[in-house]
Amino acid sequence: MSGAAALRRWLCEACGLVYDEARGDPDGGIAPGTRFEDIPDDWRCPVCGVGKQDFVPIEAVRSASTGGGALPAGGVSAGGVSAGHTSAGHTGRTSAGGTAPPIAGGSAGVVIVGAGIAGWSMARALREAGCEGAITMISACDARVYQKPLLSVALARGLDASQIGARSGESLAAELGVRLLPRTWAIDIDPRGRRLATTRGTLRWTALVIATGSSARRPEVTGDGAGRLLPVNDLTQYARMRAALDAARERAHATGRAVRAAIVGAGLVGCELADDLCGAGVDVTLLEAAPLPLLARLGEQSAQRLADALRGRGVRLFGASRLLTARAPAPVFASASSAQVPASAPVSASALALALASAFASASASASAEAEAEAEASAEMSAEVSASAPGSDASDRGIDASSVELGWSTEGGLEHREVFDLAIAAVGVTAQTRLARAAGLAVARGIVVRPASLATGTDGIHALGDCAEVDGCLGGTIEPIHRQAAAIAGAIVGRPAPYERRAPTWVVKMPSFPVVIRPMAGASASYAAGS
């Protein structure tokens, strides 16, 4: 071995995990310092389960801030969450909870909106590219670092929300020299003045990167129980679902029966969640609008095999179905305290929405009524996520009142109506574009960006990840985010590294029916998330 400097990093093209040879994969029996080519051929990605053939080497980027040494790529390593070397050479460096970094020339430097994998990848890519100035990141949540693909398989792997999000945002911010502002909402962008209004005041920026990701779609359904269909699109939503599941288990145990759960949507996440819940002893009913699960991606033959595997697992699968109603059943299984707070009305959501709407109005007096309404809606959604943060009291959020009566129809017009202890919505995602739309940026299904640089049509503003639309296509997988971040970082520091869009690799992480969907050679990259 020629020394630590020669060790490389490898990126999983399916889920974005980074295997760092210096750290290895101790949980998988791979010692630190093990080169990728020396890993046994039967080794699998610890997140999505693909083999070595789906990993590609990450080219080391030389940075002036470290005297030309190699810095790690962004992402989550097999040896630990967001692993990487620490560089103390950033002039904008700050420690968690410390003083804000100095602002050169009266500017806040680069401001990143969003602290998901896109936001963190952006911050790391900037440091790799030699950016030594201030970087500020704002996040509506606590900015905890986690691997999103784990959310739909966590039960089988024995992980709870705290174990999925094992590293704090403050820790990674300190490593990268980023000023982190958690629990902070972006209100309005002033492109001319290069200012961003937030709930903690106004930030100035030389470059602004929007990494707001996507939000879970809500099924179109009538009834007073619509708010009880729980999305699982981020860590806080997952924590809420697990709290609801735990409460449902207690109720079911008291009556000597299994928990009954419904999942609306048999796409990638819906199928994985159904398989995961079945493995945990839950009776699962899966509703899908198409005749078969993942029909558009797999084709009829493979989709039929997937349906057979789900049914063999114990899932009640209803294809060609349409959700009609969601109602709160009577009586509701709720304690006296939780019955006062239905799950569809999170604590303090309206108060926060009013505060944000007021701040929005003062920050941009000329904003339209439509933009204000969008801001209020976004604030309500953010408040709901905040109210369901890990560690908060489930009873205060009405988790005991999460049972719901669903009505749906199947082929031939046959109608069904059943009560479930838990219902999950998995009908896709929608790009978060509210902030960009209100600022007058070009928005279609996502924030429209230039293919090579991920720049919007407004000088100094970029977007990446699930919120960005490239050549008419949205994201949907994690792997492109690292390359998008590198392209934006190159544009910001004046060393262009054009982004090249590729057809993605999709992985169905089901032990009962593991599938890897790889693009054919020369295949078009015309795909869309949430379709």
Image: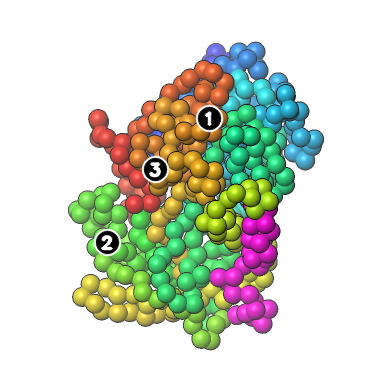
Q: Which label's residue is closer to the chain start, 2 or 1? A: 2
Does 236 appear above or below 210?
below
> x%, y% of residue 463?
50, 37
Could you tell me the amino acid type at mark 3?
Leu
Viewed as shown, does residue 351 lie left or right of 267?
right
Name the residue rendered at 68%, 51% in the picture: 362
Q: Which residue is mark 1?
A: 459
Q: Residue furthest front?
A: 366
Viewed as shown, does residue 64 lie left or right of 20?
right
Name the residue rendered at 40%, 47% in the picture: 445
Viewed as shown, does residue 96 lie left or right of 267?
right
Q: CA distance from mark 3 to mark 1?
A: 22 Å
Is residue 225 in sight in this rendering? yes
Does 65 appear above or below 50?
above
Front: mark 3 or 1: 1
Could you tell me the amino acid type at mark 1?
Asp
Q: Write down the region rendered in magenta.
A: 334-360
Q: Which residue is mark 2?
A: 290
- Colouring scheme, one of rainbow, by chain, secondary structure, one colour: rainbow
Image quarter for residue 146? top right
Q: CA distance from mark 2 to mark 1?
A: 43 Å
> x%, y% of residue 460?
55, 30
Name the residue rendered at 52%, 17% in the picture: 495
Neighbour tally class for label 2: few under 14, some 14-19, many 20 plus, Cα within 10 Å: some
Name the residue nearer the viewer: 248 or 189: 189
Q: Which residue is mark 3?
A: 474
Q: Residue furthest bottom?
A: 331
Under circle 1, the secondary element is: loop
Determine if the magenta segment contains residue 289.
Answer: no
